[in-house]
Image: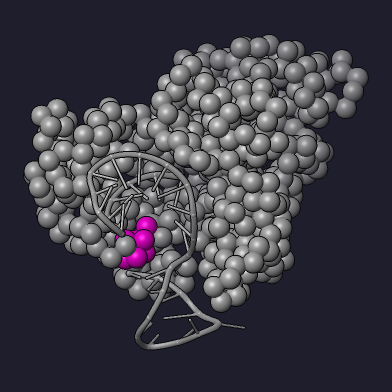
Amino acid sequence: MTNSQIADVFELVADLLEFQDENPFRVRAYRNGARAIRNLGDSVAAIVQDDPKRLQQVEGIGKAVAEKCEVLVRTGELPQLKKLQDEIPESVLSIMRIPGMGPKKTAAVYHELGIATLDDLRTACQQGRIQAIKGFGKKTEQTILSGIDLAAVAEQRIYWATADEIVEQLRQHLGELTEIQQLEFAGSYRRGRETVGDLDVLVVASRADQVMDHFARFSGSPKVMARGDTKMSIRIASGLQIDLRIVPPESFGAALQYFTGSKEHNVVLRTRAKQRGLKINEYGVYRVEGDQEKYVAGQREQDVYAALDLPWFPPELREARHEFAWAETGDLPELIRWEDIQGDLHAHTDETDGRNSLDEMAEAAQDRGLKYLAITDHSKRVSMAGGLDERRLLDQWERIDRWNERASGEFRLLKGIECDILEKGGLDLPDDVLAQADWVLASIHYGQRQPREQITARILEAIRHPHVSAIAHPTGRLINQRPPYDVDLDAVFAAARQHGKLLELNANPMRLDLDDVFCAAAKSHGIPIAINTDAHSVESLDLMRYGILQARRAGLTKADVANTRTWTELKKMIGGKQRKKRGK
DNA sequence: GCCGTTTTCGGCCCGACTGTTTTCAGTCG
């Protein structure tokens, strides 16, 4: 069982317990446990095999959750969950996910009217039976009806890159108002999460009503879901919810901190404040003296943190993973920036499934200030993309040699290949060809659904191969579309370290593979990460920024990322182990 | 269920908004 599967079990347990009106802190404990497991770089299964006691050392995992992990890993199921599922039809959870329907209301319709499915709920609303329940009314009935249709759309989180486009449009729209003095987007967007559920925008403005009126005109005519004195929520046509908050200038930093989150980061912060006789909310930090509260800070975010003796945290790190421990020991990493990148080690041309020619890609890379670009077209197994056989590849490399000879500046093209790891194992091109490459990526495109042992064996074999430099998109996941291959990443990390190989962080916003948690795990094993665009056109060389964001979330520094080095330095790095091998 | 500079019990972040209420529960972030 993977960490993500185990975490899903505890989430489900938490949902069902919440429906049963169980102690909310117990519910939270399960959610915290699930989160801790999701954030863990090492696999729970491996820890259980090795020494189950170690699980309890993870913050958020106590005796009970640790024992349940052990049961899950050993038997594949959890008796507690089975019992809950016997007591409650799981379909009530889809009712609980309708905006406005929480555990209490869901339990009410279930117990009063025996409603357990979305279809039954819709019918009951249409018949006006819901408003008869105490605490429900006509309005609630309408909210539920529109919520049922929306639930499917609203649940889907959008790619960060998509959110970023909407952010730019809204920034422009609100920018038309001179009343706005300060404006910032917060939430998971600001933290750079790979997907975004909704947008939070904070504004300092002289006239709140005018800002709200203008906000209501964004992107056609959005549905206004709530509007108060300081807070307003709209939902645009795509289903995305956008929350606007208007705050006084002396509270802007506190509000920005508060609404950037994450929730878990804020909980730690607030607990810390309490221990120091302080109170922190979206308006500021206050010293509590008796029943008096004295404003201490709030104008700027760094003031808020400083009031708690903490450094300012880059938003990407605010997940209550390692940031507080790092701050304690003064080890807060200096995160990698886009400007640190020297080259891109994964790009395609129109020789296979790319849109632009070798020359165009080279020119575009130089325009972006890169010092090198590896041309890594597909190998022949990827027939749909017109993958390269030996002859065409050697031909392309010859053209790359000629291009480099002609070039006057510092920039150089690298002779590369994205060589397929075949279904039966082994690589798609002969060793004597691969030996002539500057840079070899190995990756899986076929046989993605093979069992764990088989997939893992294929990747390990590629890692051991003397001419392979790195594994591209190591888990193959496509966000919101395709799960990762069932690969034993613990084994991949061990092999990569042993053989001095790199792992890719694919910057495509739909891939971002390895993800933040696994990039952090790779770093802890001392494995360099290559952040690559996998560009299939000149424009997609700009995808690099999404990879950088994910790398920052993993806490990676310039030193942790291989392609912050010059090609000469990088060549030494990947050549060291290989030369030793060949010398034998 | 978790956790401990208030440590084995008794806490567990905090406020806005809505709808159905005559003072507040539920939901959300």
Of residues A321 and A520, which is closer to you in this image? A321
Q: Which residue does the image show at 23% across and 59% down from the upper left?
A: A21
Residue B7: image location, x then y, percent: 45, 87
Whether residue A502 is visible, yes or no, is no
As drawn, A498 above or below A444: below
Report which quarter residue A163 is drawn in.
top right
Name the chief secondary structure element in magenta.
helix
Residue A210 among those drawn in magenta: no
Q: Which residue does the image show at 43% across and 66% down from the upper left?
A: A60
Report which quarter residue A568 is drawn in.
top right
Residue A144: image location, x then y, percent: 25, 34
Q: How is the image coloured?
A: one colour
Of residues A178 and A120, which is closer to you in this image? A178
A435 relative to A87 in the view: left or right: right
Count the numbered circles shown.
0
Residue A536: image location, x then y, percent: 60, 19
Residue A285: image location, x then y, percent: 62, 62
Report which quarter residue A336 is drawn in.
top right
As drawn, A490 above or below A292: above
Q: Which residue does the image show at 47% across and 67% down from the upper left?
A: A59
Q: Which residue does the image show at 36% across and 54% down from the upper left?
A: A7
Of residues A434 and A187, which is closer to you in this image? A187
Work out which residue is located at the far right of the displayed protein and give it: A408
**Magenta residue span:** A25-31
Whether residue A33 is visible, yes or no, is yes
A118 relative to A74 in the view: left or right: left
